[in-house]
Image (cartoon, rainbow, N blue to C red):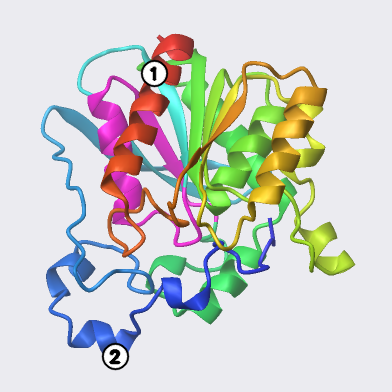
Amino acid sequence: MPDLIRPEGPEADDIRLSRRGLATAGLGGLLFAGYAPAALAAQASPVSTPADGLEIANVSYPAPDGFDLPAYVARPAGDGPFPVVVVVSEIFGVHEYIRDVCRRLAREGYAAIAPAFFVRVADPAGAEMARVQQIVAAAGYEQVMGDVAATLDWASQQLWANADKVGITGWCWGGKVVWQAAARFAAIDAGVAWYGRLAPPANATPEQTAAGAPWPVDVADDLKAPVLGLYGEADRGIPLDTVESMRSALQRAGQTESRIDVYPAAPHGFHADYRDSYRPADAADGWAKLLALFEARLK
């Protein structure tokens, strides 16, 4: 989805650290741990989930275009089968924050799979913001949906995976993918979209609107599973009027099991524990809601 009208949602000052700043911020340990330096906060103290008792793997499988798609997998030890959750990254790709989310889900009994949607071009995790935008722009809708399809197909071939119980969750760019995938794939049983764009902004050009299609507001009729949207009231990249437009679209479509919850005063990226935007209470509440939905639909 080349949806790069401020692709992640926030204003420029929401992501403050430059590479020069990182060099003087005492963050070497975190950088070596694999966090995206373009967004890592000076005082970051990210959640760190241990891998003991889990099976961790870096795998790859063929996408429809023939690309060998890499993915990070975390699942409970043992035979399973475990319900599957596809984890869709923000624009920084499968960096340590996304890998840690996979481990958190694995500790809850899920087989979490995070495909690397962007690496056909490059890994965005270590890139400057302008380059990140170029990398993300290359990941079009059909490519991304093909990668999701390949992930579902690969999971269905794993003895430890219960491919009859599949969830999807994603952040920012990945939040928009959640809505799109839930409209496209009948195999998905539930989705949780964290602050993904819902509609083109009012000042979008026709080219930008077309580039971001299909927008979640346009596919509400097609949702094949309930989606929980988790959004921030103070998100400067996702205006509340677009949230209301999506709520109206869901109501018109009779999608009574899908809803959007808005956290008062929460900025974009309130779940991202490696960034200044992190709001621990809102992140924890959203995570509890995610677990409740997946418990009800996948277990």
Instruction: Determine whether, in the image, residue 125 is placed left or right of residue 201.
Output: left
Residue 123 covered by magenta stretch: no
> Which residue is located at x 28 percent, y 28 percent?
106
Please indicate, yes or no, whether residue 193 appears anywhere in the rendered image.
yes
Q: In the rendered view, would you say 85 is above or below 29?
A: above
Crowding around mark 1 (Cα neighbors within 10 Å: few <14, some 14 to 19, many 20+) is few
> Farthest residue toward the bottom?
20
Query: Can you identify the residue that label 1 sits on?
Result: 292
Q: Which amino acid type is marked by label 2?
A: Arg
> Farthest residue toward the right?
206
Image spot of residue 66 (x, y percent)? 64, 48
Image spot of residue 215 (x, y percent)? 76, 46
Q: Which residues are magenta?
A: 89-117
Q: Which mark is residue 128?
A: none
Measure how far apart labels 1 and 2 are at the Cα level.
42 Å
Query: Can you identify the residue that label 2 sits on?
Result: 20
> Which residue is located at x 50 percent, y 77 percent?
12
Crowding around mark 2 (Cα neighbors within 10 Å: few <14, some 14 to 19, many 20+) is few
Image spot of residue 11 (x, y percent)? 53, 72
Front residue of this view, candidates 3 and 120: 3
Instruction: Determine whether, in the image, residue 9 is placed left or right of residue 25.
Output: right
Please indicate, yes or no, whether residue 65 appears anywhere in the rendered image.
no
Q: In the rendered view, would you say 99 is above or below 235?
A: above
